[in-house]
Amino acid sequence: MKNQLCLLSLSCSVLFACGASNPSDSMDQRARNAIPTADTVAMKPPTASVAASRSAHPDSSVGDASVFLGDTVHLATVVNGAIVSTLHLIKSITDLPATSCTTTSCTWGPGALATDPVSWQLVVTESAGTFDYTLSGQAKVGGDGQMHPIIIGSATPSVLPHRGSGSFSFDFSEAKVLNPMNTQVGKLDVTYSNATVGAATIDATFLGTLDEAHPPQTDNAAYAYAEDGHLGGTLQIAVRNLTSGDLVSLESRWASTGAGRSDVSVTVHDGSGGHYSATESECWANATSTSPLPYHVVFFTSSDPAHLGADSGSASDCAFPTAQQTSLTAP
């Protein structure tokens, strides 16, 4: 379907965690516990098992595997990948003994494995219960001899271990300067809060990152993820291609059962100097005796049935009967 192809071409969350700080712990242990870790930072759409449906079912008709659920899973995976790589790097450093500590700060490095082209230094400082951290790198060969900040973050732990609030930024362009093998450019900014179990909220913004389908074109993208406290949630996405100006937005909602709905809006160049705009909505439900697919379409509609496929099913079968376009705006 045309809109789905546009959505996928512009694609570039989520349970975050900060460890609770025990004053009796050593400063380096408090620092380790405060910084988010990759295993607790993962966007959680209804299921990851349907991702393959994106290419297997190009149309949304009642009974088919849900295309938009597959899109939602894919887009969540894009964010997870960027965050996981960021936090794995920090964890690999803090797993080692700190190089030096005071009562309020610890430093790891500078240092690196023999095969690592970058020498890293992590500095964590505590003030009034908040932990600020900066990961900087220096190229071993061919660099300018200076430490370049790559990741800058701040974490405020709650009374529960591995839960709290905070933010961090990853500068992909600086990382590429240090190691030309890195292909991504731009910047990722993340803000999170998950002090209440099952009610995490995460906002992520990509600025000037490579469009995965059209390199070297670049995108700005905004993501907002929220758990509803009842095992359901919402993922909102807005993407703008900085080269073409094409815009795509999506809001996916799902209940604790996994049944859900996606509403999509696109404005893209039509190839003749004009623009094409359209909206689509798709609802999916759980398997039944008559529909064995785990998440199958129960309703589809669009503003352009002639080009995007015929309307199918009834909105009354949707877990969320009413369309809801995202309020996010791509930067």
Image (tube, rainbow, N blue to C red):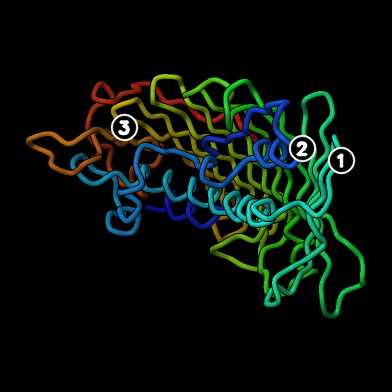
The amino acid type found where label 2 is placed reads: Met
Estimate the x, y position of residue 212 in percent, counting from the top left: 56, 62
Q: Is 216 above or below relative to 286?
A: below
Q: Are marks 2 and 1 in contact (CB under 8 Å)?
A: yes
The residue to which callout 1 is attached is 102
State which mark lies toward you, 3 or 2: 2
Q: Is 94 above or below relative to 314?
A: below
Regarding mark 2 in the picture, which secondary structure is present there? helix
Of pointers 3 and 2, the one earlier in the residue sequence: 2
Regarding mark 1 in the picture, which secondary structure is present there? loop
Judge from the rendering whether residue 51 lies leftward or rightward of residue 205; answer left or right: left
Judge from the rendering whether residue 137 lies leftward or rightward of residue 193; answer left or right: right
The amino acid type found where label 3 is placed reads: Gly
Judge from the rendering whether residue 114 lies leftward or rightward of residue 327; answer left or right: right
* Residue at position x 13%, y 42% in the image: 292
Q: Nearer the viewer, residue 74 or 192?
A: 192
* Residue at position x 37%, y 32% in the image: 261
Estimate the x, y position of residue 100 in percent, counting from the top left: 84, 50
Q: Nearer the viewer, residue 112 or 239?
A: 112
Judge from the rendering whether residue 71 lies leftward or rightward of residue 296; answer left or right: right
How far apart marks 1 and 3 lie (CA) works out to 48 Å
Rendered image quadrant of residue 155: top right
Estimate the x, y position of residue 112 in percent, counting from the top left: 74, 68
The residue to which callout 3 is attached is 258
The residue to which callout 2 is attached is 27
The amino acid type found where label 1 is placed reads: Thr
Estimate the x, y position of residue 221 in percent, counting from the top left: 63, 45
Q: Is residue 253 visible?
A: yes
Q: Please rate how many residues cluster around mark 3, counting C-alpha atoms within 10 Å: few if below 14, some from 14 to 19, many from 20.
A: many
